[in-house]
Image (tube, rainbow, N blue to C red):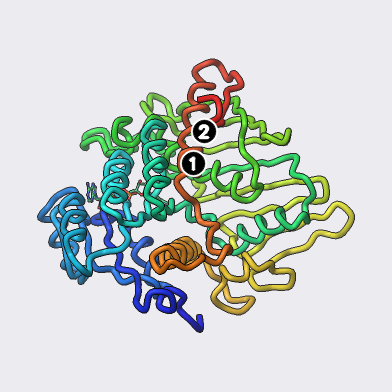
Amino acid sequence: MDSNPVIEMLGRRLRLAVIGGGPGSFIGSMHRTAARLDDRYELVAGALSSDPERSRSVGAGLGIDRVYRDGNELLAGEAALDAGADVVAIMTPNDSHHEYSMAALGRGFDVISDKPITNTLAEALEVLARVEETGLVFCLTHNYTGYPMVRQARAMVTDGQLGEIRLVQVEYVQGGKARPDDPEPDADVPWRYDPVRGGPSLVMGDIGTHAHNLVRFITGLEVSEVAAEVGHIVPDRLVDDYAGAMLRFANGARGSFWVTQAAAGVENCLRIRASGTAGTVEWMQEQPTSLTYKPLDGPVQLRTPNGPGTLPLAARASRIVAGHPEGFHEGFANVYSDAAEAIAARRSGQAADPLTLHFPNARDGVLGVKFVQAAMESSAAGGAWTSATLEVE
Ligand SMILES: NC(=O)c1ccc[n+]([C@@H]2O[C@H](COP(=O)([O-])OP(=O)(O)OC[C@H]3O[C@@H](n4cnc5c(N)ncnc54)[C@H](O)[C@@H]3O)[C@@H](O)[C@H]2O)c1
């Protein structure tokens, strides 16, 4: 990295505040690392736990200057400062995303939120409306869109290298909830297992939204209808741990969707295949630096980060020369860094580089929540084809 576009536009780094991501959170440190990797942000404030004292002690332990007792105190405190935070990143349990996003946008902060955008469609639409009213940047951390080879696949589709997309298969298979005693029977119910806090479907909120977003990101197609079964495969479990669905796309393409957290021994197998009239691309998250390209009339090829055939959208997502692997942290950081450029452009009144504007936004979040709702309605109706578009609302 030879230059810092945020410094060039604003003369300083963006000031970032975080809500959530404290004790026990895997994703909290991913957010903080992603924000720092390209030096676009400085972390100035945090409310890291739902417990005020823990929030203070954890924030102080991380060396954060301004540590607040909770998210609302943070938003009020930072808004009152001349040099308070510019951007608020939200990584709390799902039921608080709506409240914090609405409050942060209402106070003029740009927002980076973890997925799902909210637990209900009505809430998601409120967030989208507020983003549109305010003109603020809203970035949703569907971080798998930040991998160079995912961006390469998107760019190859846009470039016409696959022809018209006709078939898509996506699977997101994990094994973390394969054991029947998860969660521990005698412990308090973790927020993910409580539908009020975690949302209507555990597996769909946790990973189904990522799979849906990845399909849309790579193909540029919208899912028009879904025929789904959503339920649990571990006996007696009260929440969903798998979902399978057939998809119909707006252009007539067809797809399949398979997500579970109960496949014993599997780690984090997010995998996609998109086939068009001129060829197919295949990618899997556990080997993120290879994109397989199967043209209709030629031998199978590989695309690698910064290797031959890299298109501009993918090239800007790699920091180092070909053959040096990058992974989860760097993909997450790409989403943060692109959002930073869009935020700095907005704040300095400049036009953002169009290549930065591929990070997931509030509309993507709304469509994700709509897809979860449609899949659940379909499942309740015995797998009936159900609209997943917003136009019929
Ligand atoms: N992008 C991804 O790949 C990815 C991966 C995992 C989790 N997530 C998302 O991140 C969010 C958090 O998930 P998690 O796995 O970190 O959960 P977690 O339960 O492991 O951790 C949540 C953290 O937030 C803190 N917290 C809870 N309520 C808070 C509040 N009101 N204010 C401040 N802090 C609060 C808790 O103390 C805890 O430290 C969820 O929305 C989840 O969907 C995204």
Check mark 2 vs ligand 1: CB closer than 8 Å? yes or no.
Answer: no
Asked which secondary structure carries label 1, the reply is helix
> Is residue 86 visible from the viewing direction of this image?
yes
Q: Is residue 145 left or right of residue 26?
A: right
Q: Total number of numbered labels?
A: 2
Mark 2 Cα shell of 10 Å, populated few (<14), some (14-19), many (≥20): many
The relative height of residue 160 versus residue 3 in the rendered view (above or below) is above
Q: What amino acid is labelled 2 in the image? A: Phe
Q: Residue furthest top?
A: 381
Beta carbon at label 1 within 8 Å of ligand 1: no
Q: Earlier in the sequence, mark 1 or mark 2?
A: 1
Residue position for label 2 = 371
Q: Is residue 323 above or below residue 158?
A: below
Q: Are marks 1 and 2 in contact (CB under 8 Å)?
A: yes
Q: Which residue is mark 1?
A: 209
Are there few (<14), some (14-19), or many (20+) residues within 10 Å of tag 1?
many
| Residue lying at the far front of the rendered structure | 349
